[in-house]
Image (tube, rainbow, N blue to C red):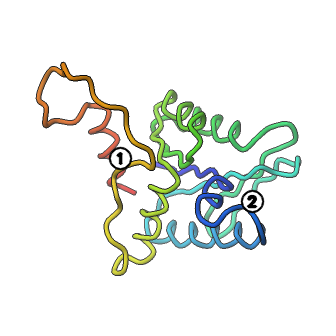
Amino acid sequence: MRIIIDGYNFIGRQKGLRGDLEGKRARLIEQLAAYHRIKAIPVTVVFDGSGKGETERTGGIEVIFSGYGESADEVIGRLAEAFREGCTVVSSDREVQQRARQNGAIALYAGEFESRLHAALRPEATPPPKEEPDEMEPPRPTEKKGNPHKLSKTERRRQGRLKRL
């Protein structure tokens, strides 16, 4: 399993995109490298680039900057298509999440992954991650058939894959 992170979306969720952006990028990569060492899960972080389309490895983390004329969202979509069920996409952007789900990947909100990241980096000081996304889910239809206490097959599969994070 691989984790693909929308870098600026994640940074914007944490502390905003103003100020020392390069320092914030370095701090995120440092945190993800520590997470990678603890969990041994491959991590790719994608940022909107200056047009060169660069890829580098830092601390075991693959860092990708989008190329000229393409956004980080497009790069993440291509990666989700390539890895399909073998990846988890972290972004609060609905379009990115939808494209990931269409390709069989799991999509997490940035806040949901942030709590898992902090729990892994400081397991004794952090409460267990909340399982709810940042936004409310649509209400369930009233005439649901089957066992009302059993999660849907898709949700059970999602929860099983998330336990590995």
- Indicate the quadrant containing the C terminus: top left, top right, bottom left or bottom right: bottom left
Residue under the image location 80 percent in, 37 percent down: 70
Residue 98's label in the rendered image is: none
Residue under the image location 77 percent in, 49 percent down: 48
Q: Of residues 58 and 151, which is closer to you in this image?
A: 151
43 horizontally vs 138: left or right: right
Counting residues from the start of the chain, the first of labels 2 and 1 encountered is 2
Q: Is residue 94 above or below residue 35?
A: above
- Could you say whether the residue bearing mark 1 is in a helix, strand or loop? helix
Residue under label 2? 56
Q: Is residue 145 above or below residue 159?
A: above
Marks 2 and 1 sit apart, C-alpha to C-alpha, by: 27 Å
Q: Of residues 75 and 1, which is closer to you in this image?
A: 75
Provide residue 150's location: percent of width, then percent of height.
16, 35
Amino acid beneath label 2 = Glu
148 horizontally vs 78: left or right: left
Q: Is residue 146 above or below residue 91?
A: above
105 horizontally vs 12: left or right: left
Residue under the image location 56 percent in, 31 percent down: 99
Amino acid beneath label 1 = Arg
Q: Alpha-carbon neighbours of circle 1 within 10 Å: few (<14), some, or many (≥20)?
A: some
Q: Answer with the quarter of the image where residue 143 lies.
A: top left
Q: Is residue 121 above or below residue 73?
A: below
Provide residue 92's location: percent of width, then percent of height.
55, 46
Residue under the image location 58 percent in, 69 percent down: 33
Residue under label 1? 161
Provide residue 123's location: percent of width, then percent of height.
36, 76
